[in-house]
Amino acid sequence: MTWVEATIAHVVQETPLDRSFVLALPDAAHADFAFVPGQYVVVRDPNETPARDWYFSLSAAPNDQGTVRVTVRARGDAVQHIYGASEGATWLIQPPAGGFHVEASAGERVVLAAAGSGVTPYRAFVEHHAELGDDTPVWLLHCARTSAELLFHAEFAAWSDERSVFTYVPTVTAEEAGWTGRRGRIDAALVAEAVGDAAVARLYACGPGPFVEAVHERGARAGLTPERLVREAW
C-alpha cells in the first residue's frame, strides 16, 4: 500500500482524553481518499523510532476539500508520541480501508451503539447524514464512564436538536453529581426502544469486544436477525 505525506492542518482537543487531527492531503492524492463512513486509515509518524502503524477511524464526513480527520484517544504511554503531534507536523498516511461501513437505506432505521471512543466512526456518518439531508431515522446510543468522556457530545446534541430524524442518547456509568442525563449501560430496554420495528432496523455496535457482544445479544432479543447486526470490535 502506498504511503502519502500529509500535513497536520488543525488539532482539536475534543475531551480530556481525545484529540482530533485534520490532515491536509497533497492534491494528487485526493481521489485516493474517497471513503465510506466507518472506514479507517493507517497513520505513521516518520519521526518515531521504531516506526509504528496506527489505525484510526475517520471522524469527519467525506469532503472535497482535500482533508481527512482522525481522532486519537490517549491510551497509555504507547500512543503519547502520536497524540502529542502539533499543527504543521507531517505524518504518513495510507488510503482508507476496512469493511465496517455505516450506511442508511430508504425505509429502514439505523441504530448506532458505541462505548467510549468507539463512537468515532459514527461522527463521520452522522455528519454526512446531516449534510445530505437524509430523512432515514438514526439513533445514536453512546456509553462512557463520565460525561467528560462523551466524545463529540456537544455536536451530537446539537444535531439531535436540529434534526427530528436523529436521536442521540448519551449515558454515563460513573456516579457524577453534575450529570442529569441517563445513567448506566446501554441495556436491553434502550436497545429495544431504539430498534423499534426489527424488520426494518439495522444495529451497528462499535467498541470493546464484550460491549459489542452484549449489545448484539440485546439486539437479537429485540428481534434483529444476524444479517441486521453489524460489528466493529477490538
Image: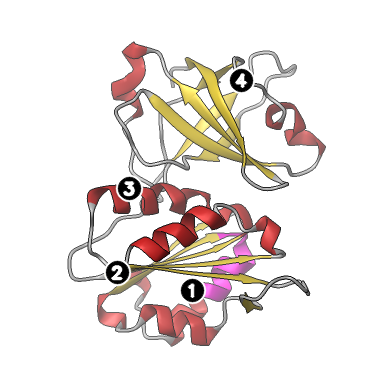
Indicate the amino acid at tag 2.
Pro
The residue identified by callout 4 is 87
Residue 185: x and y in percent read: 63, 76
The residue identified by callout 1 is 216
Give the spatial CA distance, label 2 vs label 4. Answer: 37 Å
Kind of element beneath mark 3? helix
Residue 228: x and y in percent read: 34, 70
Earlier sequence position, callout 1 versus callout 2 = 2
Give the spatial CA distance, label 3 vs label 1. Answer: 25 Å
Q: Main secondary structure of the magenta part?
A: helix
Q: Which is closer to the viewer, label 4 or label 1?
A: 4
Residue 51: x and y in percent read: 68, 20
Kind of element beneath mark 4? loop
Residue 195 in view here = yes
Earlier sequence position, callout 3 versus callout 2 = 3
In the rendering, which numbered label is found on residue 90?
none
Q: Which is closer to the viewer, label 1 or label 2?
A: 2
What residue span does the magenta drawing correspond to? 207-215
Hey, which quadrant is residue 109 in on the image?
bottom left
Is the residue under label 2 in contact with that under label 3 (CB below 8 Å)? no
Q: Is residue 91 above or below residue 178?
A: above
Q: Residue at x 31, y 81 (%)?
A: 198
Hey, which quadrant is residue 49 in on the image?
top right
Give the side of residue 81 with respect to residue 8, left or right: right
Q: Residue at x 48, y 61 (%)?
A: 157
Give the side of residue 181 with respect to residue 2, left or right: right
The residue identified by callout 2 is 137
Indicate the amino acid at tag 4.
Glu
Q: Residue at x 55, y 52 (%)?
A: 152
Earlier sequence position, callout 4 versus callout 3 = 4
The residue identified by callout 3 is 128
